[in-house]
Amino acid sequence: MLENEVLHKIAKENKLTNPKFSRLTGGDINDVFLINAEGKKQVVKINNAEKFPGMFAAEKAGLEALQKPKVIDVPSVLGLGEIENTAYLLLEFRESAAKTKDFWETFGKQMVDLHKTTSEEFGFHQDNYIGSLPQRNNASTSAADFYISERLEPQLKLAKDKGYELGVQSSFFRNISAIIPDEKPSLIHGDLWGGNYLVNEEGNPCLIDPATAFAPREMDLAMMKLFGGFDKKLFEVYNREFPLEPGFEDRIPLWQLYYLLVHLNLFGVGYKSQVTSILTQYI
């Protein structure tokens, strides 16, 4: 089915009249469009339902989990469905404005409040995705066990299947288990790089495209530091309001390892040297 025909069927299914469509910046996985239906603006993401089964249902669950504490702006899900092998997710549109003067301080405080939303177990009520890769979320009562079994091991196995020899030693898992803090599971975004937040119409942060779970909170902070795009004021406010366990700076590469493995498996050998460097750092 032609793309324009699919978009019109989505609009009709969601009772949007006289829709006009314009393409927004998306990515390798989804095509993203702004729908303007008689002045009512919404965003629709579409992809191949067979290639990415359950992706938008998982994203809906993640967005709703982040929205539930009411501590940071998250777009509401307005529709979810499938039309002839095209899956779609319909979302609130956010007009963009300039950052407020205290944007980064606000962002830091909101991340604190998000991370203070806790659970008795690590994991999530369903599996989801990190980029286009499946992400497991089986329950665990141990931060180290969760990070190893649900985050590192699946990506390490995938890397091995792709032919990357990373030389992982058993001492690596023992050593990282000993240094991962024994904190309560925090509600995290899970994939918080600079492209996964917006500045909303009020000039405040808005989170999008999550890989949500109850997980070690340091994962979000380490990802935010991996590719840049976040002002130091955010981290200063965060650590003042919700102090990190001693040794966080030394653990940053450990948490970044997961995201670098994801990038290795998605984008190729250019990330291998960073991965192997971190693996040897903890043996």
Image (cartoon, helix red, strand yellow):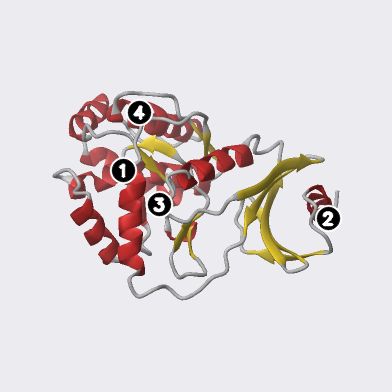
Decide: few, some or many residues near mark 2? Use Cα within 10 Å; few <14, some 14-19, many ≥20: some
Sequence-earlier tag: 4 or 3: 3
- Can you give x and y, in whole percent of width and height, for residue 271 in the image? 41, 49
Decide: few, some or many residues near mark 4? Use Cα within 10 Å; few <14, some 14-19, many ≥20: many
Question: CB atoms at circles 2 and 1 under 8 Å apart?
Answer: no
Residue 246 relative to residue 37: left or right: left
- Can you give x and y, in whole percent of width and height, for residue 151 in the image? 40, 33
What's the mark number on residue 71? 3
Residue 141 relative to residue 180: left or right: right
Location of mark 2 (residue): 8
Say if residue 243 shows up in the picture: yes
Kind of residue at disc 4 = Phe
Using the image as rendered, state which of residue 112 and residue 29 is in the foreground: 112
Question: CB atoms at circles 1 and 4 under 8 Å apart?
Answer: no
- Mark nearest the camera among 2 and 1 is 1
- Mark nearest the camera among 2 and 4 is 2
Kind of residue at disc 3 = Val
State which quarter of the image contains the C terminus.
top left
Kind of residue at disc 2 = His
Q: CA distance from mark 3 to mark 1?
A: 10 Å
- Write down the quadrant of residue 280 in the picture: top left
The residue located at (21%, 37%) in the rendering is 282
What's the mark number on residue 116? 1
Q: CA distance from mark 2 to mark 4?
A: 43 Å
Label 2 element class:
helix
Q: CA distance from mark 2 to mark 1?
A: 42 Å
Kind of residue at disc 1 = Lys
The residue located at (24%, 34%) in the rendering is 183
- Mark nearest the camera among 4 and 3 is 3
**Relative to 254, does residue 106 appear above or below in the rendering?**
below
Label 3 element class:
loop
What's the mark number on residue 146? 4
